[in-house]
Amino acid sequence: MYAEWSPGASLVDRVACLWKQDCAEEGTQIVVPDACVDLIWGPEGPHVAGPDTGPVPVRMRAGDVYRGIRFRPGALGGLLGVPTGELRDERVSFAELGLPSDLTLEALAERLRRSAAPDPAAPAIAAALRSGSSVREVAWDLGLSERHLHRRAVAAFGYSPKTLQRIVRFQRALSLARSGVPLATVAVESGYTDQAHLSHEVKRLSGVPMSGLLVAA
């Protein structure tokens, strides 16, 4: 059983949710890219899950319990003392990053106050790329060169602007599909050329067709 809830007023600007998963039976869960960084406590010990660029299969056993803190895309800032790009597609133990295994929400809030703030343009960058505009158009609209946009996107999200665009578009499509919107409409509203383009991208980013993601929801 999976559940998530709000982190509270002190963390809501940076943290998307707190979550917990209790595994009732053995199986493999596919974690798909969402542009987020998670702090995770699980059977293998506390670790940080960096921003993924593809599907990550996680083998779970009956009785396993996972707890997590999911940061909003681009909201990690300097919390971990390493560039977000260095965490891309990585799972790194708390010990390697100098985090205590028993980190509390209060301690996390204090660490966030003391660390470098995230790029204030990060939400605008993600929103503009999600809208379907090209990387060149987004850079122009934000008053940045394409090189400057690339540097800021990698620093904030761990992704190049093009990769970030693919992932936020995929997440929008997944959200629409899970709400019951027909896939042809999902493709149009998410900025894909057509439904075939949507299907191709979903398979590339998740390893399974959209129907597999909807069954797993």
Image (cartoon, rainbow, N blue to C red):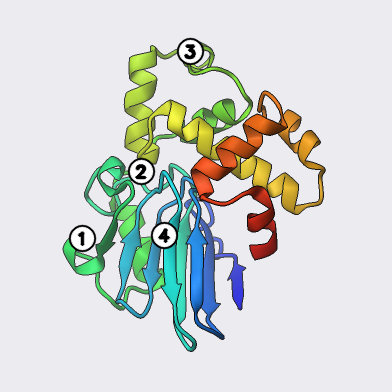
Q: Residues within 10 Å of mark 3 (few under 14, many from 20)?
A: some
Q: Does dot 1 land on a helix, a strand or a loop?
A: helix
Distance, label 4 to label 2, CA atoms, is 17 Å
Which of marks 4 and 3 precedes in the sequence?
4
Q: CA distance from mark 2 to mark 1?
A: 18 Å
Instruction: Mark yes or no: residue 207 visible.
Output: yes
Task: Name the spot of residue 54 as percent of width and height, x first.
Answer: 43, 47
Residue linked to disc 2: 117
Q: Are marks 4 and 2 in contact (CB under 8 Å)?
A: no
Q: Which residue is mark 4?
A: 38
Dot 4: within a 10 Å radius of its alpha carbon, few (fewer than 14), some, or many (20 or more) residues? many
Q: Quadrant of residue 44?
A: bottom left
Counting from the top left corner in percent of width and height, residue 98 is at 19, 64
The residue beneath circle 1 is 97
Q: Alpha carbon of mark 3 to alpha carbon of mark 4: how far?
A: 30 Å
| Nearer to us in this view, 24 or 203 | 203
- Foreground label between 2 and 1: 1
Q: Earlier in the sequence, mark 3 or mark 2?
A: 2
Query: Amino acid under label 2?
Result: Ala
Q: 92 left or right of 30?
A: left
Q: Identify the element where label 4 is drawn.
A: strand
> Is residue 190 visible in the rendered structure shown here?
no
Q: Are marks 3 and 4 in contact (CB under 8 Å)?
A: no
Q: What residue sits right under mark 3 in the picture?
A: 136
Residue that appears at 39% across and 21% down: 149
Q: Nearer the viewer, mark 3 or mark 2?
A: 3
The CA span between labels 1 and 3 is 35 Å
Instruction: Give me the C-alpha separation between circle 4 and circle 1.
Output: 13 Å
Against 166, is 133 above or below? above
The amino acid type, in three-letter code, at marker 1 is Leu
Residue in view at x 39 percent, y 14 percent: 146
Q: The N terminus lies in which quarter of the figure?
A: bottom right
